Image: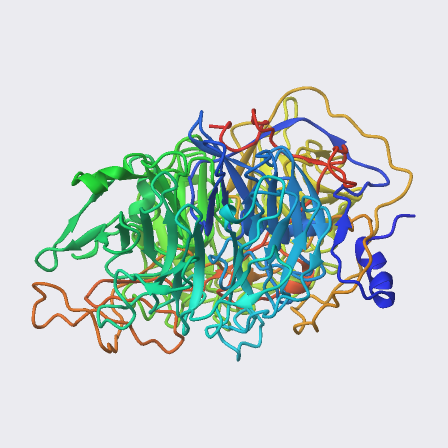
């Protein structure tokens, strides 16, 4: 019988002392009686972007070979022919959801087909798995993995620093990785197959954002931050001699080896007081450039500098466009890049500058002088060296109409990665908290012209999806999204023109439509009520979501919770998400709300799809029903329902009183308004359930399930009331942490929409053919011990001892809960009290306009702008209801997201692991990004 890696490692680590990483066989677990399968195409519903892109990496020797990493949505490769991105980690399933957090990428400059990714989402207890180094010999089409004896933090503070992975440009079998969490420097000498700690590296870092954070999220040691080689100190086939390493230690931020890693030293005379976010080597001129900030970011940073180190003289020179000692400095630096065609040309960006916008600088003389991308003329007016064209992604204006000097769209925020194409001085790309921007005429900056910045994000989908509805008429899909509100999707292949407004929600948590009057919709969502006390957390539409208006609301609401519309649209029931908020109901469009009786606060609410007076609720294992429009509820006698976890239930269209409920332990059906439920056979765990158009010759709607059937995890369809199920996704299309939102299409048989936490919205359609049933495996899959549902205390440090071993990663589980929301997009603020110290004066500033400075805010997640209309970018304290490991049943609001994994088995020639197919380098499989549009 196969043993899991966790089980094998436990016995080995107890008996060994060698510090080695673990070689993992990346292969799917089998099932004793696998469900039938049917071929489907999987594509993204286009939104284009929607999340933080902390890293963009150009291959230095192969033109147009570009990669991007995200914090929760995997990694991507650029396709020049289609001007789009192809996803590389869609095979990651929910047993290793954290592998969709990518903390670093490295592309091999010698054998350019080789690619490395350091994966893992959290270093605290939120991610149950250790991190891994993935390696590919075909540009990410297939992968092998080496598990690490510690966790990686692709969505942790400091994730924009880097790159932490680096390939020796002279002897490419050597790869280095600078780890977080005090785990030091690691090295592979066999193209990433095995890894060992560099035990003589003297500093593991000591910077933590908040040592008092008991969750472990802000209190982790941000460790080592980047590794850079000086190619000129080696020859082809021989190890590069000079290697620089950034360390999250404000007194010792940069180390160096001049003997190929045999010994290491703190570089004498180096600047102190800040963290080096970026370290870029000019191997032609013999310089190291660093960009520093006072925090690890990505949401904050108020001081920093840019420095230049001479290899020949050992001298450090401060070359900051605005030095930290200036009263005009209210930001740190990051986004440092060199034009490899003209090494004296470099660019740097503000690591964070909320107000009025980000600032980029450019130098053509090695940092001696700089020019700004925009400057002040007469306040509040600005002169700009660029124009912005967002016509391909028009929602990037965020529905805003700010007062000058703010503009929309913005250049961006969280600009950690700014990269000039090493093969083309005219092209540069940079990541923001919402998209990838770029230009193909950059050098106009140097000649007095105006260059154009456009979104270059097609195919990269990074939204966290919280709810989906597919009404029988009107737009085929309406979405509720974390951080960017949501959209009405009239064309699944086109980017929507605008997000929801009137009001704007930071995150939309719940959607519903009136089944018999589908032009009536309702949505609920999150924002800080103190920021916009005149806005409501619930909104209505009478034209299918094209336009919205808000109603009133009870006091003290910040979180949307769940909301339901009566079948005829005449009334609504709302369960706000704030702890202790009572369920309320309203006749009409929320002009007034009255507390509902007989139902607990924060229950999940839904409506019957036929009877306009009937509503349902669920809380703590009990089911509730109202027959008077939500005025009062009564608990039913139903027993045996899940009392923990993230339970989803929905009423069936066209049949009064018929319900399906998904949760830990299975799938249940009721035909009597919840008075009793019958458990479905063969469904082991259910994360969500949805309905779509009935199969030809059938009258009962097709059922869709995200869960486990006969031991196989996936997305399933049943055409016979749940009697039998067919799996409709495959091992290439798993999307990590998915299933918080799921619905069929009532107009297209076989079509299903799947929401993910970081890979956007997927639409899947039948390819034709009959379902096939694979033969059962000879052994059942390994099981994973049941873990506590609430997040456990932070575990003790993992041992780093262990022999090299191989084993199978435990099989899939359907896991559910509530998880921290991500915060990569700006929140609208109509007012904030700023306590300004110092400040930046600008030409023509009115006497009554305060100087620009750093806003004081009690929780330090702040913006940098005065004025009547402000935007704060911070860890948004919204609740994202997402799928995640069972022990994360409840998470703190405001820290991140999640994702998961199930791979395939065909072996490859590289190393002892088994390959995991993904999209090929030259073509895109059905459902792959880029080729779907």
Q: Nearer the viewer, residue 125 or 45?
A: 125
**x and y percentages locating residue 844 in the rendered image:** 7, 63
Quarter occupied by residue 647 = bottom right
* Circle count: 0
Q: In this view, does 21 lie above or below 447?
A: below
The image's colouring method is: rainbow
* Residue furthest front in the image: 313
Instruction: List the single residue furthest toward the top.
Output: 769
Q: Residue, x 58% and y 72% (percent of image)?
A: 216
- Location of residue 703 with respect to 616 vertically, above or below: above
Q: In which quarter of the image is residue 878?
A: bottom left
Q: Which residue is drawn at 45% across and 66% down?
A: 296
Give the residue at x 26% y 38%: 443
Say left or right for 766 vs 591. Answer: right
Image spot of residue 827 (x, y percent): 34, 59
Image x and y of residue 320, in percent: 29, 62
**Figure check: 91 above or below 529:** above
- Towards the viewer: 80 or 90: 80
Q: Is residue 94 visible?
A: yes
Q: In this view, does 495 lie above or below 196?
A: above
Task: Identify which residue, 94 or 136, lies in the foreground.
Answer: 136
The spot of residue 769 in percent (x, y) is 69, 19
Can residue 672 be seen in this snapshot? no
């Amino acid at each position: 019988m196969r043993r899991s890696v966790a089980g094998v490692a436990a016995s080995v680590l107890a008996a060994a002392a060698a510090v080695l990483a673990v070689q993992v066989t990346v292969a799917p677990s089998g099932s004793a009686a696998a469900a039938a399968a049917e071929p489907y195409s999987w594509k993204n519903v286009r939104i284009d972007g929607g999340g933080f892109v902390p890293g963009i990496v150009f291959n230095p020797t192969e033109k147009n070979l570009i990669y991007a990493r995200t914090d929760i949505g995997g990694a991507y490769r650029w396709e020049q022919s289609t001007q789009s991105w192809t996803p590389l980690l869609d095979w990651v399933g929910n047993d290793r959801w954290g592998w969709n957090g990518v903390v670093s990428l490295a592309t091999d400059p010698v054998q350019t087909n080789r690619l490395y990714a350091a994966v893992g989402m959290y270093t605290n207890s939120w991610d149950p798995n250790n991190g891994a180094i993935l390696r590919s010999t075909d540009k990410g089409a297939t992968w092998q993995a080496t598990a690490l004896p510690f966790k990686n933090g692709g969505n942790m503070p400091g994730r924009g620093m880097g790159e932490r992975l680096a390939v020796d440009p002279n002897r490419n079998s050597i790869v280095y990785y600078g780890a977080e969490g005090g785990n030091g420097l690691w090295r592979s000498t066999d193209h990433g197959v095995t890894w060992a700690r560099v035990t003589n590296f003297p500093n593991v870092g000591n910077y933590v954002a908040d040592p008092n954070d008991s969750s472990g999220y802000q209190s982790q040691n941000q460790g080592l931050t980047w590794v850079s080689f000086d190619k000129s100190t080696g020859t082809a086939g021989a190890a590069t001699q000079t290697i620089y390493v950034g360390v999250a230690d404000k007194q010792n931020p940069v180390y160096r080896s001049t003997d190929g890693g045999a010994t290491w030293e703190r570089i004498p005379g180096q600047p102190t007081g800040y963290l080096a976010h970026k370290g870029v080597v000019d191997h032609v001129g013999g310089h190291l450039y660093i960009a520093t900030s006072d925090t690890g970011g990505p949401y904050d940073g108020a001081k920093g500098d840019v420095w230049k180190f001479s290899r020949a003289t050992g001298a450090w020179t401060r070359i900051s466009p605005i030095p930290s000692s200036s009263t005009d400095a209210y930001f740190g630096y990051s986004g440092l890049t060199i034009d490899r065609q003209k090494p004296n040309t470099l660019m740097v960006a503000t690591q964070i500058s909320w107000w009025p916008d980000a600032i980029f600088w450019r130098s053509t003389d090695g940092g001696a002088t700089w020019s700004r991308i925009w400057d002040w003329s007469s306040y509040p007016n600005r002169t700009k060296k660029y124009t912005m064209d967002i016509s391909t992604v028009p929602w990037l204006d965020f529905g805003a109409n700010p007062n000058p000097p703010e503009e929309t769209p913005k250049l961006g925020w969280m600009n950690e990665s700014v990269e000039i194409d090493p093969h083309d001085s005219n092209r540069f790309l940079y990541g923001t908290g919402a998209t990838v921007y770029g230009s193909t005429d950059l050098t106009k900056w140097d000649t007095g012209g105006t260059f154009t910045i456009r979104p270059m994000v097609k195919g990269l989908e990074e939204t966290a999806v919280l709810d989906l509805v597919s009404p029988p008429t009107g737009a085929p899909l309406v979405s509720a999204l974390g951080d960017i509100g949501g959209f009405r999707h009239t064309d699944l292949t086109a980017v929507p023109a605008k997000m929801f407004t009137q009001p704007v929600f930071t995150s939309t948590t719940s959607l519903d439509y009136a089944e018999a009057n589908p032009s009536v919709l309702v949505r609920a969502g999150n924002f800080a009520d103190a920021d916009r006390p005149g806005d409501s957390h619930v909104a209505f539409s009478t034209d299918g979501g094209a336009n919205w208006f808000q109603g009133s609301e009870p006091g003290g609401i910040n979180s949307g919770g769940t909301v339901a519309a009566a079948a005829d649209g005449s009334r609504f029931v709302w369960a706000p998400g704030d702890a202790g908020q009572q369920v309320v109901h309203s006749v009409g469009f929320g002009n007034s709300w009255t507390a509902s009786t007989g139902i607990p606060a924060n229950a999940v609410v839904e409506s019957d799809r036929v009877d306009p007076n009937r509503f349902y609720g669920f809380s703590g294992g009990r089911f509730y029903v109202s027959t008077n429009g939500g005025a009062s509820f009564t608990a039913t006698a139903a027993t045996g329902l899940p009392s923990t976890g993230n339970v989803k239930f929905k009423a069936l269209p066209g049949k009064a009183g018929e319900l399906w409920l998904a949760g830990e332990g299975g799938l249940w059906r009721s035909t009597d308004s919840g008075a009793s439920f019958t458990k479905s056979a063969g469904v082991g765990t259910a994360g969500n359930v949805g309905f779509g158009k009935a199969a030809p010759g059938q009258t009962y709607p097709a059922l869709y399930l995200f869960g486990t059937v006969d031991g196989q995890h996936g997305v399933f369809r049943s055409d016979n009331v749940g009697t039998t199920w067919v799996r409709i996704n495959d091992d290439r299309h798993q999307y990590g942490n998915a299933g918080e939102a799921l619905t069929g299409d009532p107009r297209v048989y076989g079509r299903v929409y799947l929401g993910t936490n970081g890979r956007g919205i997927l639409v899947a359609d039948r390819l034709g053919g009959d379902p096939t049933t694979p033969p059962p495996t000879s052994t059942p899959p390994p099981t994973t011990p049941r873990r506590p549902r609430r997040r456990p205390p932070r575990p003790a440090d993992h041992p780093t001892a262990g022999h090299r071993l191989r084993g199978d990663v435990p099989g899939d589980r359907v896991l559910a809960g509530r998880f921290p929301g991500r915060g990569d997009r700006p929140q609208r603020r109509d007012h904030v009290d700023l306590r300004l110290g110092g400040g930046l004066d600008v030409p023509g500033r009115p006497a009554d306009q305060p100087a620009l400075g750093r806003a004081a805010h009690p929780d330090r997640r702040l913006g940098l702008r005065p004025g009547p209309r402000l935007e704060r970018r911070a860890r948004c304290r919204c609740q994202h209801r997402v799928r995640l490991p069972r022990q994360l049943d409840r998470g703190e609001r405001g820290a991140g997201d999640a994702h998961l994994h199930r791979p395939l088995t065909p072996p490859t020639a590289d190393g002892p692991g088994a390959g995991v197919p993904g999209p090929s380098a030259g073509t895109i499989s059905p459902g792959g990004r880029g080729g779907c549009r």
